[in-house]
Structures are given as structure tokens and as C-alpha cells.
């Protein structure tokens, strides 16, 4: 979540796009992907996208299927419904992937050594946040690529990495990307949306969650200031906060996270050219 003292580099976004190499079952899937990535299926007349128990409308006749960072290795079936109601299916083979590890020294801070009261506070906050992920999905209010959350946008780091804080490994990998930014830099909305939560949280610090429709929620953490309020409508490019180092952080940076249809994915896939997202082979 922060600048690491020792950061082994892993393969870049190109490696993510190409998929990991792993042993496949005899019925080899046509498309492979790593946890935390996205695949797309473009076809004229597409009316509905289906993945597991979820279904949603396509974006300009393209289905985008996000693969959750915690998705276990195995085959995932995806489907599209055409203009005449016909259903086509394809299989995405999700393989294991090690993004890397970072060690972070937080010093003697509450986030490094939480008290029972701190843990109770975090539990209450997580209950509030959990309500975001069960909201009914609304029509999309964005197009791809999304706008940059800061300008200029530096290299993204640490998505999916295992983090070791003061010698203790975090329970989950890093769910967002970190951008090294000068404190006080404006953070803007990457698309039109509604602010679902804007508050000072124990681990995330001053944090903002925005619903952009189509099940897409963006997260901006560790801010020094929050410039919006819960329920506020924002337009793409509106300033929502300022870069800081609040919460579990060892220096100024922006944590930018994305959940799409419930899946935690690398935001780089939505910030770049959508044509570069790997295509499903039905």
C-alpha cells in the first residue's frame, strides 16, 4: 500500500495480458488469464454478458469480464447473448500468479499495532464498506478508457503484491495500485458517478468510494483532504480530494482501486486502451 523498502519487481502489464503458464486439463481453454485481469468479448448484436450468477449489459457490443484477484485457479465460463436471444459460451482458464512481495516499516503507529478499540473501529467500518458491494447495479456512466485519477499519471505499482508490515504479513494481497504522488496533488473523478462513501477510515485513511454504474466502483485512499460528500454527484475530472499519507501509509501516494461486477482488478486495464485487453476466443 506504500513505498517498500525492498521491492522485488515482477513482470509488467504485458505479462499480465499474455497470461501465466500453467498445467492445463485435457480440455484446454481457449483463453487464459491471471487473477486481477480482464478479458473482453466483442461481437455485433451483443445484448447481455453473463459470468457466473451475474449478468450485465455490454459496453458498445463488448462484454468485459473481470477476473477477481482472489479467483482460484481453474476454468471460468463466460457467455454472451445475441440480438436473437442466442447464447454463446467460452471458457477462461485462470492460472496461479505471484505478483511479488514488499516489506514496509510503519514504525510504532496504530495501524502497525492496533489496539482492541482500533480493531473494533475497523470492524464497524468494514460493515459500512461491505454494503457497497451488494448494491444493485445501475446503467454505465462511463466509457473506456477511464480518465486518469491524477495528472500526470506516474507508473502504477504494487497491485496484487503480498505486503509485510513490520514483519507481519497482511491477510490479503494489495487490492489496488499505488501511484507515487506529491502530497496535496488534486485527485479527480475518473468518470461521472455518485459518491457512496467519503470518510476517514482506520486503514484506508481519508477514503472515497464512487459508483460509476455498471457495477464499477473506484476507490481513492490515503488522502490528506476529502472534497466531496456521501451522495454527491460528480462529473469526470471533478476534484474529489488531495493526495496524502493518512491511514496505513508510510509516505504520500495515491491508492487507486477498482471493483467491477464485484471483482478486484488491476486499474491499469481500465486506464489504458481497451483494444489491448485480451479477447475471448469462443
Image (cartoon, rainbow, N blue to C red):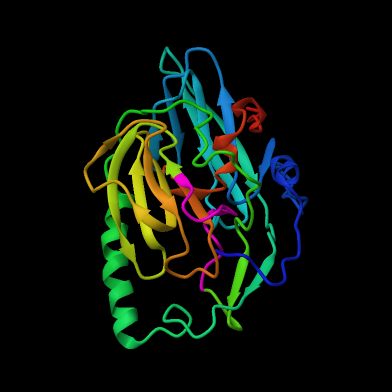
Residue located at (72% from left, 50% from top): 25
In which quadrant is the C terminus drawn? top right
Q: Is residue 79 left or right of residue 14?
A: left
Q: Is residue 89 left or right of residue 210?
A: right
Image: 132 above or below 211: below
Q: Residue 107 occupies which quadrant of the picture?
A: bottom right
Residue located at (37% from left, 34% from top): 214
Q: Position of residue 188 (x, y in %)?
A: 43, 40
- Residue 180 colored magenta? yes
Q: Position of residue 69 (x, y in %)?
A: 55, 54
Residue located at (52% from left, 57% from top): 175
Q: Position of residue 273 (x, y in %)?
A: 62, 28
Q: Residue 31 occupies which quadrant of the picture?
A: top right
Residue located at (34% from left, 44% from top): 210
Image: 131 above or below 116: above
Q: Residue furthest left?
A: 231
State the count of labels: 0
Image: 140 above or below 8: above
The residue closer to the viewer here, 171 or 79, is 171
Image: 212 above or below 201: above
In which quadrant is the N terminus drawn? bottom right
Magenta residues? 171-186
The residue closer to the viewer here, 40 or 240, is 240
Task: Please identify the dominant SS of the magenta region.
Answer: loop
Q: Position of residue 230 (x, y in %)?
A: 23, 48
The residue closer to the viewer here, 127 or 58, is 127
Amino acid at each position: 500500500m506504500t513505498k517498500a523498502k525492498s521491492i522485488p519487481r515482477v513482470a509488467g502489464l504485458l505479462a499480465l495480458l499474455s497470461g501465466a503458464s500453467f498445467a492445463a486439463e485435457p480440455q484446454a481453454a481457449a483463453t487464459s488469464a491471471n487473477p486481477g485481469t480482464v478479458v473482453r468479448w466483442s461481437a455485433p448484436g451483443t445484448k447481455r454478458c453473463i459470468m457466473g450468477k451475474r449478468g450485465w449489459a455490454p459496453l458498445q457490443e463488448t462484454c468485459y469480464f473481470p477476473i477477481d484477484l482472489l479467483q482460484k485457479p481453474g476454468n471460468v465460463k463466460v457467455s454472451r447473448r445475441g440480438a436473437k436471444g442466442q447464447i454463446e459460451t467460452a471458457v477462461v482458464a485462470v492460472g496461479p500468479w505471484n505478483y511479488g512481495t514488499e516489506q514496509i516499516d510503519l514504525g510504532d503507529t496504530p495501524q502497525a499495532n492496533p489496539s482492541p478499540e482500533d480493531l473494533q473501529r475497523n470492524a464497524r467500518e468494514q460493515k459500512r464498506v461491505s454494503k457497497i458491494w451488494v448494491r444493485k447495479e445501475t446503467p454505465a456512466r462511463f466509457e473506456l478508457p477511464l480518465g486518469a485519477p491524477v495528472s500526470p499519471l506516474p507508473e502504477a505499482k504494487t497491485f496484487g503484491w503480498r505486503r509485510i508490515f513490520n514483519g507481519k504479513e497482511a491477510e490479503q494481497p494489495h487490492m489496488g495500485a499505488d501511484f507515487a504522488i506529491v502530497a496535496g496533488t488534486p485527485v479527480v473523478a475518473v468518470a461521472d458517478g455518485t459518491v457512496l462513501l467519503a470518510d476517514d477510515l482506520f486503514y484506508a485513511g481519508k477514503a472515497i468510494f464512487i459508483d460509476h454504474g455498471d457495477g464499477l466502483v473506484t476507490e481513492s485512499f490515503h488522502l490528506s483532504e476529502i472534497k466531496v460528500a456521501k451522495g454527491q454527484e460528480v462529473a469526470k475530472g471533478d476534484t474529489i480530494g488531495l493526495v496524502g499519507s493518512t491511514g496505513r501509509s508510510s509516505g504520500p501516494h495515491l491508492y487507486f482501486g477498482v471493483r467491477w461486477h464485484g471483482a478486484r482488478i488491476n486499474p491499469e486495464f481500465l486506464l489504458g486502451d481497451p483494444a489491448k485487453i485480451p479477447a475471448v476466443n469462443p
